[in-house]
């Protein structure tokens, strides 16, 4: 047994070639090959785990494939570098040249790199996910899919917009569905000063309550307030909750129509701009004299 171990040790110590001042032996080559095999195995395992994680977070398959490819090549570079260092190949000069090349490429693709890093931040923080309703740059959009460089969303007019991830990370935006999908919608209506204000309030409260019940929102009560005294009307605000902020336009139309018909049924007059003109007595006398002369 000792003789076999001695033969194996002698075989592993057989010199093959020299790299600089380092002598490469059979054991060195086998160790480097083993490190490469382990690198491939680690890469496959991490890719499988990452694919499961990204799929659970709603990342589309194309972005998942891109991230897996980047991870794969990163692990291969690290593993192969370690294997070559073990084999006695000095990579210092190569790394120095690669660093200079990487800096040049970095300046050339700075915007792409920023969007890529922003995509990773969004992936980790989970402040946005497919299906979320956002207000970005004064536009309301619904997220369709998230990529590693950009996010694809659709406007209420049906237009698809591509939003660079850097915009979502570097600016303020509203996410109407971050914690839940409840959204409070407000409408304003003005009535003439001669109206019965108690009847106005009761009518608006009834409309708001029936609307929220129809929309299936029972956890948050609607609000009706007298918001101000305008030049031509007493102004009221009606705030109701809805569970689908993406359907804001049809919902606000429904609420406006409900208020209109409720006011019609109760005889409440919706105010509109009016202008009263008053003439001083000298002016009135002048008009009378002119009329009499005709």
Image (cartoon, rainbow, N blue to C red):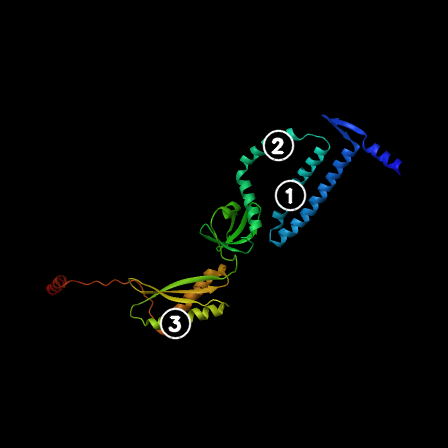
In this view of the protein, which residue sits in the foreground, 54 or 247? 54
Judge from the rendering whether residue 260 lies leftward or rightward of residue 51; answer left or right: left
Q: Residue 240, image x and y in percent?
A: 44, 65
C-alpha span from label 2 to label 1: 19 Å
Residue 271's spot in the image, x, y percent? 32, 66
Residue at the (40%, 68%) spot, across then down: 259
| Residue 252 higher or lower than 110, as above or below | below
The label on residue 71 is 1
Q: As displayed, is residue 57 above or below residue 34?
A: below
| Residue at numbered disc 2 | 98
Of the image marks 3 and 1, the number of the one nearer the N terminus: 1
> In the image, is residue 2 above or below residue 55?
above
Q: Which residue is mark 3?
A: 203
The percent coordinates of residue 87 (x first, y second) are 73, 32
In the drawing, does residue 269 fall left or right of residue 176?
left
Front-lying residue, 188 or 128: 128
Q: Earlier in the sequence, mark 2 or mark 1?
A: 1
Tag 1's secondary structure?
helix
């Amino acid at each position: 047994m000792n003789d076999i171990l001695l033969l194996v040790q002698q075989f592993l110590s057989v010199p093959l070639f020299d790299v600089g001042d380092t002598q490469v032996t059979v054991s060195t080559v086998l160790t480097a090959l083993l490190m490469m095999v382990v690198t491939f195995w680690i890469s496959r395992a991490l890719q499988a785990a990452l694919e499961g994680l990204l799929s659970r977070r709603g990342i589309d398959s194309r972005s998942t494939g891109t991230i897996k490819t980047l991870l794969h090549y990163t692990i291969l570079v690290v593993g192969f570098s370690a294997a070559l260092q073990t084999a006695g190949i000095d990579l210092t000069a190569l790394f120095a040249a690669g660093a200079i090349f990487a800096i040049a490429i970095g300046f050339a693709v700075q915007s792409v790199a920023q969007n890529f890093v922003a995509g990773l931040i969004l992936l980790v923080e989970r402040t946005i996910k497919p299906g979320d309703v956002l207000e970005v740059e004064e536009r309301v959009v619904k997220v369709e899919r998230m990529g590693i460089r950009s996010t694809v969303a659709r406007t209420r007019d049906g237009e698809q917009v591509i939003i660079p991830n850097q915009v979502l990370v570097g600016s303020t935006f509203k996410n109407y569905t971050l914690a839940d999908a409840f959204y409070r919608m407000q409408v304003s209506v003005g009535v003439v000063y001669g109206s019965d204000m108690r009847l106005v309030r009761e009518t608006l409260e009834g409309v708001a309550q029936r609307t929220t019940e129809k929309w299936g929102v029972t956890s948050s009560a609607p609000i009706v307030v007298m918001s101000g005294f305008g030049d031509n009307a007493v102004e009221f605000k009606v705030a109701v909750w809805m569970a689908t902020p993406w359907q804001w336009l049809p919902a606000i139309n429904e609420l406006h129509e409900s208020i209109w018909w409720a006011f019609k049924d109760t005889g409440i007059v919706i105010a509109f701009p009016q202008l009263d003109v008053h003439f001083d007595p000298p002016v009135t006398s002048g008009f009378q004299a002119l009329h009499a002369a005709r």
